[in-house]
Image: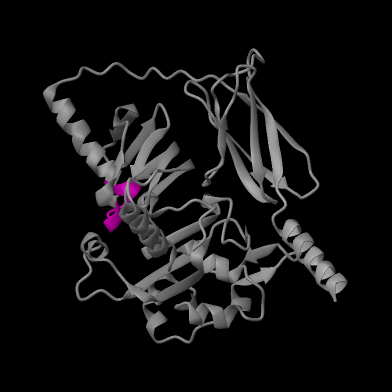
Amino acid sequence: MKTAVCLLALINVAHLLAQTQQHSLSGAVLDAETNFPLANANVFIDKSLMGSATDSSGLFHLHNVQPGTYDLVASMIGYETQKREIIITSDSKTQIVFKLRPILLQGPEVVVTAEHEKQWQRDLEKFTALLLSTTQNVKETKILNPQVLVFSENQEGQFEAAAQAPLLIENQALGYKLDFVLEDFVATAQNLSYSGSTKFEELTPKSDEQNEKWQKNRRKAYLGSLRHFLAIVGSTPPRIDAKLKEEGFEVFSFKHVWERENMRAAEPVNWRTFSRRGKTPDEILLSFPDYLGVKYLNEHEERNFLIQYHIEGDPRPQESWLKLEQGPVKIDRLGRYQSDAALTKFGYWAWERLADMLPFEYKP
């Protein structure tokens, strides 16, 4: 009996080690023109807590990286940011060399007047509302270094923003500090398009009450989110449809944007309509024509959402819809997907932005 118990324990330990097998990632960051090493460059896995600064020899090391597909980012003030997709396997030894190109940060000379300062403040307020959104969490979220931002707007009303350094964002609602490398930001009266890379850092709670508040807010931000939905889609079939229903999701398919109003009367579709398994068991592809509508029944819209989009009436269950821009999108079992440009969000998920973002490591 003792032998059997010990053998069972060893099997369980081996299984646990296989599940938690982790990997170290290393490399260097160099100047593309001189090949000299760049010290204090930031290297991080996008949308995660994992990152490191290069040493005096331009070398970096990231430890305890679990197998998976990631976007690895290298950034430094005065240089173009680079992003590489990397695949970590349990037996791989990954080394990456970044060669960053210098850029000229000096912009056109601007005569600073009182009116110019007022306009910049107005632009900052507009940018903050667009980037962070107007959700409840925005009240406790702020950009710590707004002075690095430059704004412009043309006669057609196209509003653009650029940053000469990563934006430092402190989110006291969720308990994170974000280093956000803004890559592109364009807003019109109808559309908002922005891209960037995010490194998270957990803040230290000042009390048990604050920690409890952060845990509660993180869970609320996760539930009903796109990542919550995709994590279920990436789980093991055939329970996907039942799990979506259990956790409050209904999914619909429609061809034209104006048809989304019919979601309330349409019959939900099953997971095979919008996802399929890839070449390996861990490869899941989000794949559907036209638009995919998603309702989250367990939580209603915030009042600020109704106000911003001039929607009359009482809050309803949250409604969002998706469009694939570049064909099928690969997701993993944690609901992660690599390319923001490949998946366009509309509705509630489009309204929830940086102030509601969680790192990949978060699990409810």
Q: Residue furthest left?
A: 114
Q: Quadrant of residue 177?
A: top left
In the displayed structure, 323 sits above or below 68; it is: below
The N terminus lies in quadrant: bottom right
Q: Position of residue 269 (x, y in %)?
A: 54, 82
Number of numbered markers: 0
Residue 134 colored in magenta in the image: yes
**Residue drawn at (70%, 48%), measured in percent from left and top?**
22
Asked whether residue 313 appears in the rendered view, the answer is yes
What segment is highlighted magenta in the picture? Answer: 129-137
Q: Is residue 9 magenta?
A: no
Q: Position of residue 326 (x, y in %)?
A: 59, 56
Q: Nearer the viewer, residue 333 or 55?
A: 55
The residue under the point 56% across, 83% down is 242
In the rendered image, the vertical position of residue 139 relative to residue 235, given as above or below:
above
Query: Eyeballing the image, is 115 above or below 245?
Result: above
